Image (spheres, rainbow, N blue to C red):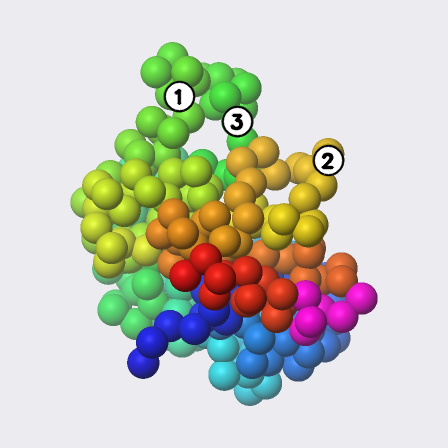
Amino acid sequence: MEKQGKDYIVFPLDFSSVQQAYDYVRLLEGNVGMFKIGLELFINQGPSVVEMVKKESSAKIFLDLKLHDISATVFRAMQRVADLGVDLVTVHCSSSQAMLEKAVQGGQGKTDVLGVTLLTDNDATAVAAAGLKDEFVDDPNALVMHRAQMAFDAGCTGIVCSGQEVKQVKQQFGKEFLAVTPGIRPAWALLENDDQKRVTTPGQAVSFGSDLIVIGRPIRDADDPARAAQKVIDEIEAAL
């Protein structure tokens, strides 16, 4: 079945209450391909929020936990995640390749692992502050590609990266290696003082090769979120 515009859209359920999450799941059902459950909501509600999304929507589920711990702990945590029946889970690439490998093993082929390369609110200043090599400070894209190689070698399904790196990721690792892009802002919703440093529009990201785009505020804060989602779909389909 051919991928439609809505299948590219990941909507983050970045809410503190399950009622708000429920309202947006119902509102956006049929307009997005995947719902992302992050730390705030998962810590507040636990696995019950996953069950709610499954019950109320046909969309896939992305559990954005950004796991980062010793390999054995991540392995056991991923086994529990796989039991929940979610489609994707995030693990930090800033640890070791061994940890990434254990995450993949823990997923048991039921839940796919995405490596988080460099958070989208990080820039060269943040990379320097982390004490990383000068080559990565001078070119944060090189750090993304270094971590993408780790994720690829570990057997991860793909990575989270900005739209600016997607072309190179696809050239180096092939079309099957997923590129999931946060920091998405439609042309009609670009902010002057955005907390995301490395942003792209939906059309740009998809044309570069992004498989999934995470887009929150422009849809969430719209007067008509379903209509805003449809505008994003239109922009994606025009780019395709």
Q: Is residue 203 visible?
A: yes
Which residues fall within the magenta stretch?
223-228
Disc 3 + disc 1, Cβ < 8 Å: no
Which disc is residue 192 wearing? Answer: 2
Does residue 224 show up magenta in the picture? yes
Query: Magenta segment, principal secondary structure?
Result: helix
Q: Residue at x 49, y 77 (%)?
A: 59
Task: Please tell me whether mark 1 sits on a helix, a strand or a loop.
Answer: loop
Q: In the rendering, at what x and y percent does residue 53 appear?
A: 57, 78
**Mark 2 or mark 3, which is nearer the start of the sequence?**
3
Q: Residue at x 63, y 57 (%)?
A: 216
Q: In the rendering, at what x and y percent does residue 125 appear?
A: 54, 19
The residue wearing badge 1 is 139
Q: As displayed, is residue 144 above or below residue 124?
A: below
Q: Residue at x 40, y 76 (%)?
A: 85
Which disc is residue 123 wearing? Answer: 3
**Mark 1 or mark 3, which is nearer the start of the sequence?**
3
Q: Nearer the viewer, mark 3 or mark 2?
A: 2
Q: Residue furthest front?
A: 238
Q: Is residue 43 visible?
A: no
